[in-house]
Amino acid sequence: MPFVGKTLMEADCTTMINNIDAVSQKAVEAIYPHDISGKNVLAFEAIKRNIAHIIISEKEEIANGNNITLLALEQKLKASLSIPDFDFPVNISGTVDRIDLHNGKIRVLDYKTGKIGKLGITDWNLLTKDPDLGQARQLLLYAMLWNDTHPNEKANHAGIIALKEHNKGVRYVGEKVSARKINNELTPAIMEQATVVFKESIKHLFNPQLPFSEP
């Protein structure tokens, strides 16, 4: 984690771009000791290209006057929830790809290589039932974990950096207030609502009378 706790500069982004080949090769060799071939070669080149696009986008953000400070990468978080009617705590854990400070606002971010699902919530009752809201659920859970372990530095936003849609910027989770607008500020009320939903979902998971089913 070379840049953790460091405010990014344009020069840092240039260095990262220049190091993409070497760093990517080292990561691949750790998994595949022998040379990759066929479709893996094409996938490898696509991944490197996507990484470059993301870094270039951030370099442009900095050039336009935005301030980005990396606080943590691949941050392991855990929290203990007290569930009504349970006589034991429920431990939850997760690994967040990135936590940063963007113009003074703390963001909980996840990288995705595939399709982005629905991030705008219109009905909180659907958060744990609608499979298309799976990524929204994940982001809010990560934010809850971060807030539990950093009560004085709570997350302001939670979003996805889509490697294949880098030109769209960070996509944030939040309450959908209109057809094209999502209120992405993670207010105390939003996080309280999310916590209530998660607790209810856990109660369902522990209920032996309710069978598991595929969404």
Image: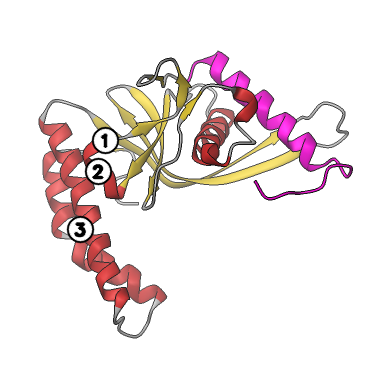
Looking at the picture, does residue 64 appear above or below residue 210?
A: above
Q: How much space separates mark 1 and mark 2, taking CA atoms?
A: 6 Å
Q: Nearer the viewer, residue 40 or 141?
A: 40
Identify which residue is drawn at 41% across, 74% down: 31
- Please state which amino acid type lies under the numbered disc 1: Gly
Cα separation, mark 2 vs mark 3, equals 11 Å
Which element type, helix, strand or loop, lies under badge 3? helix
- Residue 128 x/y as whole percent: 63, 35
Under circle 1, the secondary element is: loop
- Residue position for label 2: 166
User: Residue 49: which numbered mark, if any?
Assistant: 3
Determine which quarter of the picture holds residue 105: top left
Q: Which label belongs to residue 169? A: 1
Rendered image: mark on residue 180: none
Q: Position of residue 118 (x, y in %)?
A: 46, 35
Q: Nearer the viewer, residue 163 or 147?
A: 163
Inspect the image, locate mark 2, and give the three-letter code of the amino acid beneath it.
His
Disc with the residue nearer the chain's start (2 vs 3): 3
Horizontal and vertical percent for residue 75? 47, 45
Residue 27 is one of the magenta-drawn residues: no
